Amino acid sequence: MRILLDECVDQRLHLQLAGHDCQTAAYAGFAGFKNGALLSAAEEARFDVLITTDQEIPFQQDLSTRTIAILVLCAQTNRLAALRHLIPDVLRALDGIQPGQVMLIS
């Protein structure tokens, strides 16, 4: 699965997602892209999932026609130490998430 890590997510999280093609927004060339532009660029680049800590994306964007799925990580901070305990749930979610779907992981 092709996964894009939003800029708000600690970039070291990609090391926890072995077995997936996981890139940071900066590495993919999307640094500075905001929500709608980021989603469009990610879809055009054929990413399957965006992982973010931005809990507002589902309310700010019309996701009904999107082909990319979104995992929203809900933790006290966006630092790796706070996100690491969510990884087992993230990996389970990746097994079943569908295009256009939003899942909150907390």
Image: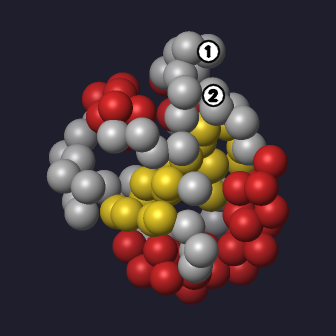
- Left or right side of 22 for 75: right
- Left or right side of 106 for 84: left
Dividing the picture into quarters, in which one does residue 87 lie? bottom right
Dividing the picture into quarters, in which one does residue 6 lie? bottom left
Residues marked 2 and 1 touching at CB (< 8 Å): yes
Q: How is the image coloured?
A: secondary structure
Q: Mark 2 points at which residue?
A: 100
Q: Mark 1 points at which residue?
A: 64
Give the number of marks.
2
Residue at x 47%, y 74% (from the top left corner): 14
Residue at x 58%, y 56% (from the top left corner): 1
Whether residue 17 is visible to the viewer of this picture, yes or no, is: yes
Q: Where is residue 57 in the image (x, y as percent from the top left)?
A: 51, 34
Residue at x 38%, y 63% (from the top left corner): 23
Q: Quadrant of the C terminus?
A: bottom right
Instruction: Report crowding for label 1: few under 14, some 14 to 19, many 20 or more residues within 10 A (C-alpha).
Output: few
Q: Where is residue 59 in the image (x, y as percent from the top left)?
A: 57, 24
Q: Position of residue 61 (x, y in %)?
A: 49, 21
Report the amino acid beneath label 2.
Gly
Whether residue 39 is visible to the viewer of this picture, yes or no, is: no
- Left or right side of 90 for 64: left
39 shown above or below 73? above
Considering depth in this image, is 73 or 67 the residue closer to the camera?
67
38 shown above or below 83? above
Q: Where is residue 46 in the image (x, y as percent from the top left)?
A: 42, 40
Of marks 2 and 1, which one's residue comes earlier in the chain?
1
95 shown above or below 65? below
Report the amino acid beneath label 1.
Ser
In the structure shown, which secondary structural element does the residue marked by tag 1 occupy? loop
- Mark 2–mark 1 Cα distance, whole angstroms, equals 6 Å
Residue at x 34%, y 32% (from the top left corner): 44
Report the disc number at residue 103. none
